[in-house]
Image: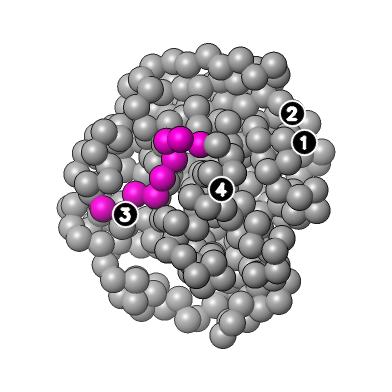
Amino acid sequence: MESGAFIDEAGGVTLSGTVDPAPWWSFTKTVLAIAALRLVEIGSLSLSEPIAGARYSLRQLLRHEAGLPDYGSAPRYREDVAASRTPWPADRLLAELQADRLRYEPGTNWAYSNIGYMEVARSIERASGLTLAAALRRLVFAPAGLTTARLATTPADLAGVQMGDAGDYHPGWVYHGLVVGTVEDAARLLRMLISDGLLRPDMRAAMLERRPLPEHRSVLHPDPAYGLGLMLSATDPLNHPLGHSGEGPGSRIAVYARGRKAAALWTGLSAERIAETEVFRFLA
């Protein structure tokens, strides 16, 4: 079970598998980063100033340097997701994780945090005066010309979305928001971000400001780093695949670009092909 889109340097698209929308999982973080940076462009948000009432900045949130915890590995969270229970209110989530207790001084360390991106989503809503769904439509999906991408907030929003083995999943368990759309739209968005000026040059350069993460080296990521909503190479990132991987109940997705080539592949967790491996092979 898979859905793939591969865009060559001339813009030609090759599709594989099904064409139904899929969950973008943590590629949603790239979408949120684009929306936040567009608000920075017009002066509605600041990258460097502390978020109101907090000790961390938007830049630190986007680069997972704010000191906030993550909920993905919390046992009670995982148990309730697996049991298909109703998502907790956000206040309960924050209390369960003791999110008011920073794990380190902002900017001094790195730890992947979905709660950090929940704060990014809240900042986007406050600065735009819109719901997150409306803000993403106005700031990202419409300017990029995407026709299938949207925010899913209820189980009904997942009707027609390929979910692998997680057909009864509630998107409210993704507290920063879950974007769904075709893999072609995911690949087109990333290609436009890297090569076609979706952001001002200074904002795109800010997105590529990265924290090297040598402790996370792997065969696929021999020189890993994290920028603002982007997984990339610590050295010369534009000459290596950059984008984001994501995984949730039942499936995973990899969306990466290199130059004017881009690719996105969604697979069920039982698939023989590994999404990142296939995408990187195309971009090599």
Mark 2 belongs to which amino acid? Gly
Front residue of 156 and 232 = 156
Residue appearing at x 18%, y 52% in the figure: 84
* Residue picked out by circle 1: 238
Vertical relation: 203 (above or below) 145: below
* Of marks 4 and 3, the one in the foreground: 4
**Which is nearer the N-term, disc 3 or disc 2?**
3
Q: Which mark is residue 259?
A: 2
Please report contact status of discs 1 and 2: CB closer than 8 Å, yes or no: yes
Image position, residue 157 (x, y; %): 27, 46
> Gap between marks 4 and 3, in whole Å?
18 Å
124 sits left or right of 234 in the view: left
> Gap between marks 1 and 2, in whole Å?
7 Å
**Which is nearer the N-term, disc 1 or disc 4?**
4
* Of marks 3 and 2, the one in the foreground: 3
Please report contact status of discs 1 and 4: CB closer than 8 Å, yes or no: no
Mark 4 belongs to which amino acid? Val
**Which is nearer the N-term, disc 4 or disc 3?**
4
Provide the residue span drawn in magenta. 146-154
Please report contact status of discs 3 and 1: CB closer than 8 Å, yes or no: no
- Secondary structure beneath label 4: helix
* Residue picked out by circle 4: 140
> Gap between marks 2 and 4, in whole Å?
20 Å
